[in-house]
Structures are given as structure tokens and as C-alpha cells.
Image (spheres, rainbow, N blue to C red):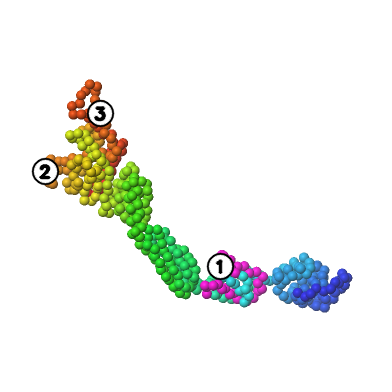
Amino acid sequence: MKTSLSFISSPGRLLATALLLCAVAPCTTAQRPKLTEAQVEHLIQIHAPDGLVASQIEARGITFAATKVDLASWTAEGAGPRTLAALRALILTGSIQLRTEPGGTVSLDGTSVGSANSAGLLLLQDVVPGPHQLSITKAGFHSNNQTFTLGDRETRQIFVPLVWAGGRLTISAQPTDASISITGPSSFSGPLDAARCPLGTYTIIVSQTGYVTQTRALTVAADQSYQQHFQLAVDPAYLKKVLTDAQTHLTDDDLDSAIRLSNQALTIEPSNASAYAIIAEATFRHGDLQQFVQDAGRAIQGGQSITIPLMHVHNFPRHLVHEVDMTISRSGLKFSYAPGVKCNIPESLNYDLLARPTIIRDASNTIVLHLVWPVHPQGFGSIHELDFVPLGSGMVRQQLPQGTIPIFGYPTVFQVPQNADAQYKAIIDVIIEASR
């Protein structure tokens, strides 16, 4: 804008305005020429009457494309509201609603005008009508130029995409919750699905508790896609330690810890028969017999055995009981008891000799687990029998009527747990499944 004129008195200003208007346009009935930018600016600077200047702008028009920047400048110089309104009505500039890559640097006709926001949007206002060129650049992308023509007061929506100039990386792992770390020119954490990756060499580390960590180096080239899959192998040392700790807790009767550690082993190796065996023995002691049958079957099918603590009942010549461990495997049953116990229980029984186990009441009316097998392999001759009650069963002496003298000692019965029948059924189910 030109420098403001010195003060002119009001009558002098009117005279100067009239002379100026007549000078630029003879007072005739012919159509008068449009006002130039310099003439409008001069009228504002000499503080010509607001209504007069506005009427001239409205009647004659202007020869230039006024912008909002011009309006702000003329407002500062004292342009009246009617003058500004007349000029504002003649503004012909348009706007551009640009969509491109987030963070892309935007230039219009060689001049930087800003950057796209996080959504990839940038609004350009007060753009003069006519032909233009947009240029978008961003590190790691191919630049893109686009030409267009903007009409008077047009709002143009323009999409200028940028093509990634680096590589794309897809990374997956098994197990799926493994930790994936990628370091290099940029750092990532996986898994990745066609993720943009700047050029350079990267180190990929995939790890998970209980598995052997894998590390790979990868060099990413321009416009290339890479797929990397990691299949982690179980760490044998870690798995062995977890199962050893679980067995220790089982031995110490810390059943919850034994189950927790065994389940941890199964997350690493879902088919681990040793883990199922520990869980089966722990759940039997816990009284979760349905889970016991399920996991005992898995353990035995996987080649492991299940050991159940019981008590062996002697009915003749005396009513006695002692602890015994019954081990169930695919080959048969095994029995073991503490040293010093005098008992003729066989060390093992093959399934081909064993009759189906049953639940009966013995001579003392105690509910017991009953096993039967013949002396002769072909089933001839006498048979052997074994009776068992749950661990913790107690022997109670029966009270005789007053004055009665026992001949063979006081008769005894066993008090067994309330779920004894359920325990027997669960053991029978496991034996039948193992013998198939």
C-alpha cells in the first residue's frame, strides 16, 4: 500500500475526491471505467466519504482481484464499513480442500503453504482464480505434482496421493502372543501387516517365555515387500524345570501350585503328557474327579502313568488296612506300599487277566473298590481278590451288646469319605479307558 497522504480538511477532501473522480472518469452519461487498485487505495488514504467511495465501487466495479489480505490492510488504513462491504462483495478468490499424506509438505505455485494435518487435510483459502500447480513432498515418499484451474469463488476438493518409496514388511509369529521387536532406521513392534518400512537393515527379535528366542537380519530395498514368519521352538530346559517344580509341589501336597505350573507347561506344549499326569493326580486329591478322569486319560494315552493313593483292606484273618499306591498305565496296574508292610499284593496286574473292577460291600458292609483275577492265566481254578478304600479311611471297632464276649476279637468296620463311591467310579473309568 502507498504511504498515507497528509491531513486534508473536510471541504478540501470533498473537493479532492470530486476532482479525482472526475479525473479518472469524465462526468458524462457514458459508462465510466472501473476503479484501479491504486485509485481505491488513494480514496481510502485521503479518507474520502465512506458512502461516496462505496457507491463508486458498486457502480463502476474494480479492475483487480481483491483479497482478504487487502481488506485487512485497508481496514487498518481507515476504510469505512460500506467501502469494505462493497469490496468484500467483489472478492473472487476461491479455496482448496486438499487431501494427501498426513504430514506432507504442500507448495502452491512454488510457494510453501503448510503441511497436511494428522488426517491428511489442508485448507487453502484466498486462492486467486486461474491455473495453479500443487506439489506435495514428504520424506520416504515419492513426490507428486498436480495442476488444476480454479474458478471464481470456487471451492475445489483435490486429492493428491503420495506413493511410499520404501519397503513394506509383514511379520507374524507362532505362538501368536510372542513379542516381536524390529530395530533399524525405524523401530517397530509386531506383528506387522504390510507396514511401511524405511530403507535400511533391520534386526528382528521374536521371543516368548518358554521358547527359544529367534533373531534375523533383514535389508529393506525400495518398493519391495517382505514377509517373515517365525515358528518358535519350545525351550526344553525351561519346560523341564517347570515340570520338575510342578512335581515337587505335588509331592509337597501343594496341589494348586502343581496345577498352575502344569497348565503353564501346557501353554508351551499342549500335548505334554507329563503335565496332564501331574494335573490328574492333583485334581484327584482335590476331589475334582471329572477333571481327573479327563486328564488321566490324556496322560495315559500319551505314554504316562497315573498314581493314586489308596488303602488296601484285609478281611481275613483279621480286619486290617494299610496304605498302597495304585499306578495305572497302558500296560496294566502296579502296586507299591511302604517297606515293612506284610502284604501279598502282586506287584503288577495285566489287563488281560483282570476282570472289570466293581464296587461292592465287603463282609463288614464297607463300600470298597473290588478287583478280581484268576490264578490260572486261562481263567481256571480259584481267583484272587483285592479290596481298596480311599486314603484317610478309618477303622472303627463295633460296640457289642452288653455282656457279650467276642470270640475272635471285636469286629471292626471302616469309615470311608462321603465321596468314596465317586472316587471308585472315576478310578474304574480310567482303568477301562487305559485297558482299551
Left or right: residue 187 compared with residue 396: right
The disc, 2 or 3, on the residue closer to the chain's N-terminal end is 2
Nearer to the camera, 352 or 258? 258
Q: Which mark is residue 398?
A: 3
Left or right: residue 75 compared with residue 340: right
Instruction: Inspect this view and state whether residue 424 appears.
Output: no
Q: CA distance from mark 2 to mark 3?
A: 38 Å
Q: Which residue is depicted at the point 28% across and 35% down?
A: 394
- Tags 3 and 1 touching, CB below 8 Å: no
* Residue 120 counted in the magenta span: yes
Instruction: Inspect this view and state whether residue 181 appears.
Output: yes
Tag 1: Cα neighbours inside 10 Å, few (<14), some, or many (≥20)? some
Nearer to the camera, 267 or 415? 415
Q: Which residue is depicted at the point 41% across and 62% down?
A: 207
Q: Which residue is depicted at the point 83% across and 76% down?
A: 20
- Tags 1 and 2 touching, CB below 8 Å: no
Choose top left, top right, bottom left or bottom right for residue 193.
bottom left
- How many marks the image carries: the answer is 3
Q: Which mark is residue 102?
A: 1
What secondary structure do most residues of the magenta stretch adopt?
A: strand
| The N terminus lies in quadrant | bottom right
Please name the residue that numbered disc 2 is placed on: 380
The disc, 1 or 2, on the residue closer to the chain's N-terminal end is 1
x, y percent for residue 373: 17, 43
Nearer to the camera, 249 or 191? 249
Front of the two marks 3 and 1:
3
Front of the two marks 2 and 3:
3
x, y percent for residue 249: 35, 48
The amino acid pointed to by label 2 is Phe
Choose top left, top right, bottom left or bottom right for residue 57.
bottom right
* Residue 80 counted in the magenta span: no
